[in-house]
Image: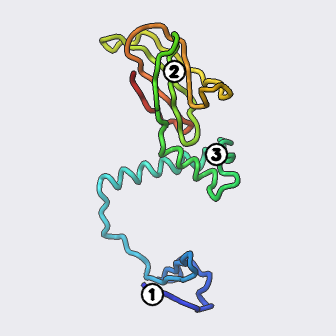
Amino acid sequence: MAKVENNPIVRGISGKIGNLVFRPMPNGETYVSGVPNFDRRKFSEGQKDHQSRFKRAVAYAREAAKTQPIYARLAAGTIMSAYNFALSDWFNPPVIHKIERVYGRIRVQASDNVMVTKVLVTILDEEGKVVEKKEAWKVDPSTRSGTDWWEVDLVAEGKVLAEAWDLAGNVVKGVL
């Protein structure tokens, strides 16, 4: 790879010209190299899996950046685009921080890099059968408990299974 310094002819050039690739660097230098050849490259199963996941993420981000206004709101005033936020959301599932029983209610603290869209709480008996199941509601953010909390009225006893979804359709489960 050749490094070009102080040459006004190649200043500002980027991309491929013939069999040469010009790569401008942030410090103002330009590197020139031959076109890479990937003909004999063999991808591992892990690489193929990631490439497949990335293709699905790109398809989601292209559509969601146009149809979900929250991504544009998050991108406003930053160097990132709505597409970048949508892509990041696809790769980052929500997180359930805490599940607790308080005064006949079940509270779930769940967060996401963009937003949690739904929390579903299920009560299971000792054999794993569903006793009770309801969608939780988001706690009013003006209360002292903050914006990450969801609540549901469930009175049955048993194991508590909480599921949280984000805008990209990722789901995560937590158990109490």
Up the image or down, 81 lies above or below 170; here it is below
For mark 1, what is the residue? 2
- Disc 2 or 3, which lies upstream in sequence? 3
Amino acid residing under circle 2: Arg
Q: How crowded is mark 1: few (under 14 residues within 10 Å), some or many (20 or more)?
A: few
Up the image or down, 103 lies above or below 112; here it is above
Dividing the picture into quarters, in which one does residue 139 lie? top right
Front residue of 60/89: it is: 89
Helix, strand or loop at label 3? It is helix
Residue lying farthest to the top in this orientation: 156
Residue 54 at what x, y percent from top left?
45, 51
For mark 3, what is the residue? 71
Rendered residue at 35%/54% (across/down): 48
- Disc 1 or 2, which lies upstream in sequence? 1
Helix, strand or loop at label 2? It is strand
For mark 2, what is the residue? 107
Rendered residue at 50%/22% (across/down): 120
Rendered residue at 32%/52% (across/down): 46
Residue 168 at what x, y percent from top left?
54, 39
Up the image or down, 57 lies above or below 19; here it is above
